Image (spheres, rainbow, N blue to C red):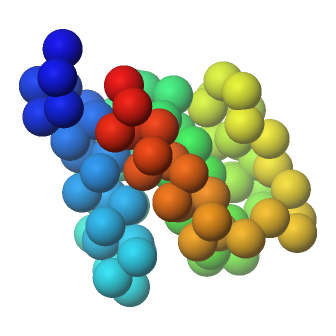
Amino acid sequence: MTAGDDPARDNCRRAIRATLAGDWEQAHLIVQDLDDPLACWIHAILHKIEGDAWNSRYWYARSRGHQYQDHADARSELLAALAEADRE
């Protein structure tokens, strides 16, 4: 599968770009219904940005492999998530 062939990954990329552009609400709408570990990670980051640590921790747990860290920079995490989306 090449980049652009996976609708879930494409939606994850769209959500990350929306977040980086300051549109948290649009990003949240994109990822909230995706059953994908990357989407769960993005969802977790969005709740961290919002300041909802409990909900953020829930989505980190569903993201398989990523953990909530209070000190982690959300923008750096989003860029890492974008790189992961581009790799897969």
Looking at the image, the residue that sits furthest to the bottom is 22
Pinpoint residue 53: horizontal percent, then vertical percent: 78, 62
Residue shown at the point (51%, 60%) measured from the top left:
79
Pinpoint residue 32: horizontal percent, then vertical percent: 39, 47
Q: Residue 21 occupies which quadrant of the picture?
A: bottom left
Residue shown at the point (28%, 35%) measured from the top left:
9
Q: Residue 33 occupies which quadrant of the picture?
A: top left
Question: Visible in this render: residue 52?
Answer: no
* Vertical side of 72 occupied by 80: above or below: above
Residue shown at the point (24%, 57%) measured from the top left:
14
Looking at the image, the residue that sits furthest to the top is 1
Q: Residue 27 occupies which quadrant of the picture?
A: bottom left
User: As drawn, is 2 to the left or to the right of 13?
Assistant: left
Question: Looking at the rendering, in which quadrant would you find the N terminus?
Answer: top left
User: As drawn, is 83 to the left or to the right of 23?
Assistant: right
Pinpoint residue 75: horizontal percent, then vertical percent: 58, 71
